[in-house]
Image: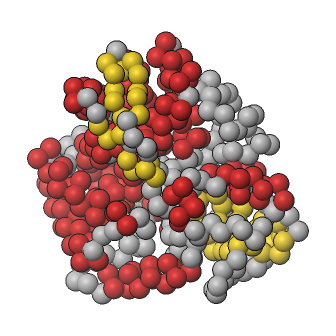
């Protein structure tokens, strides 16, 4: 196991090291990852273990794992803590940990989730379908007319940001500015997307002020949108504060859009590499739902989460101690040979397909899964309907990250149907 280093971002930029995860699943399902200093970090790679441990929030805490959404390197976590401290000291409350669901444990998480779920009802999501479809068709047709396009910024990136802005009720004329701020918030270890700290701080402040103004407007004049639903929802006599709404607004607009963007790009690349699957999808639109589930399994845009261990327990003969950290790798679980037949085959007819692309279950299952599925279904329905062939005209360029599994550039020519 000495060559396995899941902190090596260059390895992930070349491609997900599936051979490492296959070896871990086989020989070391609870693997103590080498680190220079700090708490021990365990790597869990099997589907069954990840499903169980990600649900066991009492022994594996989100609220105590400040680095759960950061890289494996302890230096990254120290920098993250410094950023949080610096932002908390500003005049606007920009403490990104407070009120962010992915860094909460029950019962606070349960209460917050019940509140937020009021805005993610099937009805609320279905209202977005016409607008998403119109925008998707417009972008695909524009790329066809252009001849060649970088699929990610031309098509995959705008749709999720547009859908979320629509869902929140942000006016159309504001969306270009929201997109710019969202990209500044996302940031990345990838040098191409590195953001100046001052630009990041300004984006946080601008987002906070914009969301606060939007909340004030909806309280004065409610509408049929997510913002109104969030602000009017009531759990145990309490409603969401303006400050909590602002943090949720930022999280949804940045992180929520990023994962769908990369899933779309990975799905297109998978269909390019598997032309028989593309032809099957074009010939039978009823396969779209299954294709989306296989794309989610194949892409697994969020590769892992991390938790802090709050009490001792044993797993596969390893003594995991209080204060250690466990990382569970969804990207490995979704290739687990014990669960998926021929896991390295991309098969849009795969059934069953109980992937963990939206999390392992328990309290942190992705609330936005319905919205993501809607966008992906529309995207691949319209591609199959309007495009006869997706021709690569350059090499795909992968994101330099061990957290997000993504293709950031995908030069293609879309041939009209």
**Camera-side residue of 65 and 4:** 4
Identify which residue is drawn at 82% across, 66% down.
315
Identify which residue is drawn at 84% across, 59% down.
27
Quadrant in the rendering for residue 309: bottom right
Residue 254 visible in the current orientation: yes
On-image quarter of the N terminus: bottom right
Identify which residue is drawn at 73% across, 46% down.
336
Q: Residue 373 in the image: x percent, y percent?
A: 46, 36
In this rendering, position of residue 256 left or right of residue 197: right
In this rendering, position of residue 307 left or right of residue 395: right
Q: Residue 162 in the image: x percent, y percent?
A: 26, 43
Relative to residue 80, is residue 60 depicted above or below? above
Q: Residue 101 in the image: x percent, y percent?
A: 46, 62
**Camera-side residue of 15 and 154:** 15
Q: Residue 225 in the image: x percent, y percent?
A: 26, 43
Quadrant in the rendering for residue 245: bottom left
């Amino acid at each position: 196991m000495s060559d396995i280093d899941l902190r090596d971002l260059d390895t992930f930029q070349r491609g997900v090291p599936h051979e490492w995860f296959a070896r871990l699943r086989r020989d070391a399902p609870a693997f103590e990852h080498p680190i220079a200093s700090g708490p021990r970090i365990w790597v869990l790679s099997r589907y069954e273990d990840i499903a169980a441990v990600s649900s066991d929030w009492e022994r594996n805490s989100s609220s105590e794992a400040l680095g759960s959404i950061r890289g494996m390197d302890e230096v990254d976590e120290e920098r993250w803590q410094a950023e949080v401290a610096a932002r908390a000291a500003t005049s606007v409350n920009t403490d990104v940990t407070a009120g962010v669901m992915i860094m909460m444990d029950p019962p606070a998480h349960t209460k917050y989730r019940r509140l937020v779920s009021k805005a993610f009802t099937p009805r609320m999501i279905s209202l977005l379908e016409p607008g998403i479809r119109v925008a998707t068709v417009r972008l695909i047709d524009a790329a066809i007319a252009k001849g060649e396009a970088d699929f990610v910024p031309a098509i995959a990136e705008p749709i999720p940001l547009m859908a979320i802005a629509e869902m929140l009720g942000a006016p159309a004329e504001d969306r270009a500015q929201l997109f710019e701020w969202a990209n500044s918030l996302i940031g990345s270890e990838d040098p191409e997307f590195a953001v100046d700290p001052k630009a990041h701080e300004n984006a946080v402040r601008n987002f906070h002020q914009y969301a606060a103004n939007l909340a004030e407007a909806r309280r004065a004049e409610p509408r049929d949108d997510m913002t109104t639903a969030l602000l009017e929802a009531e759990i145990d006599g309490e409603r969401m504060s303006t400050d909590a709404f602002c943090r949720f607004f930022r999280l949804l607009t940045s992180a929520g859009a990023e994962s769908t963007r990369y899933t779309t790009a990975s799905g297109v690349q998978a269909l390019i590499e598997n032309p028989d699957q593309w032809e099957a999808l074009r010939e039978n639109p009823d396969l779209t739902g299954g294709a989306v589930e296989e794309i989610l399994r194949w892409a697994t845009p969020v590769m892992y989460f991390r938790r802090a261990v709050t009490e001792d327990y044993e797993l596969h003969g390893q003594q995991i101690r209080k204060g250690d950290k466990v990382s569970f790798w969804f990207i490995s679980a979704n290739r687990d040979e014990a669960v998926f037949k021929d896991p390295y085959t991309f098969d849009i007819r795969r059934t069953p397909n109980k992937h963990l692309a939206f999390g392992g279950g328990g309290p942190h299952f992705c609330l936005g899964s319905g919205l993501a599925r809607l966008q992906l279904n529309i995207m691949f329905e319209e591609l199959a309907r309007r495009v006869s062939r997706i021709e690569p005209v350059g090499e795909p360029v992968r994101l330099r990250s061990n957290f997000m599994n993504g293709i950031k550039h995908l030069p293609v020519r879309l041939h009209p149907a």
